[in-house]
Image (cartoon, rainbow, N blue to C red):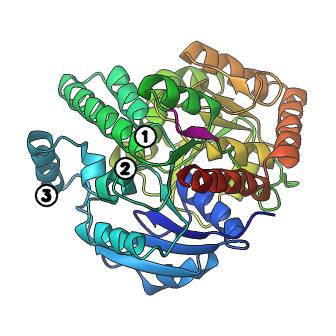
């Protein structure tokens, strides 16, 4: 057993409510790491955050330091002015610049100078903007945990965007993100990703020699499990944060290019979109189609998953954790996903999942599941067995723990 580490964990917000894929991954990993290591949590704290959010941080860290921060409301006039200002006067992408905090940088410098910690973990790329010299000026070993290859997401937005002006914006942000992400990754001691394709991309596109490997996706197999609930015939579920651009784009594509053909074929079809903070484009789907239910934030996603016959992941943009698929597998609901949606996961088409990239393929694979109870049960059972055997949070945290020790050793 390796010696316990004093870890400074950098984040751009508290983890409660634990309502996104990234938060779920970090929360469960930190709960495991906290059992064996000393975890100090340094994070921005959005204005007007309830006190309960900071109190609950003791579940995943021993001590916390909160840096006050105010986010400009999305799609407000101030938001657009802020974005425009960044486009004109900053070399960094907006999603990075918005988390810049001189106070957070000062806290990191002070902790580093006093050698308070054995390791700094930068959780997501965004907090890296507050590392002195992006980590190059820090003596403490720094491990950058890349939940996504952020430039890839922006590139895919650019490639799928049909609006000319938005396309120009995404192209500029993609190029800026490429530059920033490469520089940040090169400046830290070690980098870990969340899938083998992401690891290969970081090494190939950025020429990195400090990428240690990938941390697999995990799932709480005791929390997410099959229930003896009758699934509603011809029902589809989508699960994900509905203010995250890749999810919004995927749902919009499904509604425009796939849903009409399915509805013609199955008149009793229903679709449930489960996820927090649905943007106006998503809410409009529920208003326009009476058979589409947009839930917004829910206390528990499991009843919605267990009541549906099929889950869809129609992502054409994105990367990262893909927790939604593992949660579906754990509950035994068969899943139809694009290859991008399931990218990097150890799943096999026709065994654990069904893969489809075109509208016609989506209609075909969903229809196969609707029309065969045997296929639904087989895919669902195979998925459950896969996550039970390999992907508990305890095993995932153990892999990450090894990368932590490897990063410390690289600095010596």
Is residue 374 found left or right of 278 in the rendered image? right
Mark 2 touching mark 1, by CB under 8 A? Answer: yes
For disc 2, the marked residue is 279
Q: Is residue 168 rendered to the left or right of residue 145?
A: left
Give the residue at x 56% y 55%.
412
Marks 1, 3: nearer the viewer: 3
Give the residue furthest to the front.
412
Q: Which mark is residue 248?
A: 1
Does the magenta run of residues contain 410? Answer: no
CA–CA distance between discs 3 and 2?
18 Å
Q: Start and end of the magenta stretch?
A: 209-213
Question: Mark 1 to mark 3: distance in Å?
Answer: 22 Å
Image x and y of residue 155, in percent:
36, 27
Q: Position of residue 142 (x, y in %)?
A: 48, 55
Which numbered disc, 3 or 2, marks the residue closer to the eye? 3
For the residue carrying disc 1, how many other residues have a C-alpha within 10 Å: few (<14), some (14-19), or many (20+)? many
Q: Viewer-proximal residue, 207 or 158?
A: 207
Location of the N terminus (image quadrant): bottom right
Main SS, magenta residues:
strand
> Disc 3 marks which residue?
78
Q: Is residue 223 placed above or below 256 in the rendered structure?
A: below
């Amino acid at each position: 057993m390796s010696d316990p580490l004093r870890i400074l964990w950098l984040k751009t917000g508290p983890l409660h409510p634990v309502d996104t894929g990234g938060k779920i991954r970090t929360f469960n990993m930190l709960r495991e790491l906290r059992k064996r290591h000393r975890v100090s949590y340094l994070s921005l704290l959005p204005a007007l955050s309830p006190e309960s959010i900071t109190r609950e941080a003791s579940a995943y860290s021993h001590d916390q330091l909160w840096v006050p921060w105010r986010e400009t409301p999305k799609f407000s006039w101030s938001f657009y002015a802020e974005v425009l200002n960044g486009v004109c006067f900053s070399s960094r992408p907006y999603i990075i610049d918005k988390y810049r905090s001189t106070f957070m940088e000062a806290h990191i410098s002070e902790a580093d100078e006093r050698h308070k910690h054995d390791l700094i973990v930068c959780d997501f790329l965004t907090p890296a903007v507050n590392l002195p010299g992006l980590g190059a000026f820090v003596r403490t070993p720094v491990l950058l945990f890349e939940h996504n290859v952020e430039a890839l997401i922006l590139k895919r937005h650019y490639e799928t965007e049909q609006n000319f002006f938005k396309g120009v914006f995404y192209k500029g942000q993609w190029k800026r993100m490429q530059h920033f992400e490469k520089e940040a990754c090169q400046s830290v001691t070690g980098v870990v990703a969340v899938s083998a394709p992401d690891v290969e991309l970081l090494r190939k596109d950025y020429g990195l020699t400090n990428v240690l490997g990938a941390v697999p996706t995990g799932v709480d197999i005791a929390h997410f499990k099959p229930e003896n609930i009758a699934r509603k015939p011809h029902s589809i579920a989508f699960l994900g944060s509905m203010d995250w651009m890749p999810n919004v784009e995927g749902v919009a594509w499904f509604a425009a290019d796939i849903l009409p053909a399915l509805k013609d074929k199955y008149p009793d079809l229903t679709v449930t979109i489960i996820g927090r903070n649905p943007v106006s484009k998503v809410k409009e789907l529920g208003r326009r189609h009476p058979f589409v239910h947009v839930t917004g934030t829910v206390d528990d996603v499991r009843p919605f998953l267990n009541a549906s016959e099929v889950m869809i992941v129609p992502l054409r943009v994105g990367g990262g954790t893909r927790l939604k698929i593992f949660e579906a597998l754990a509950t035994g609901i068969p899943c139809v996903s694009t290859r991008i949606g399931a990218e990097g996961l150890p799943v096999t088409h026709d065994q654990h999942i069904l893969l489809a990239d075109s509208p016609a393929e989506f209609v075909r694979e969903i229809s196969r599941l609707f029309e065969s109870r045997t296929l639904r049960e087989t895919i669902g059972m195979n998925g459950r067995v896969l996550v039970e055997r390999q992907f508990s949070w305890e095993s995932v945290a153990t892999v990450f723990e090894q990368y932590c020790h490897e990063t410390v050793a690289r600095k010596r």
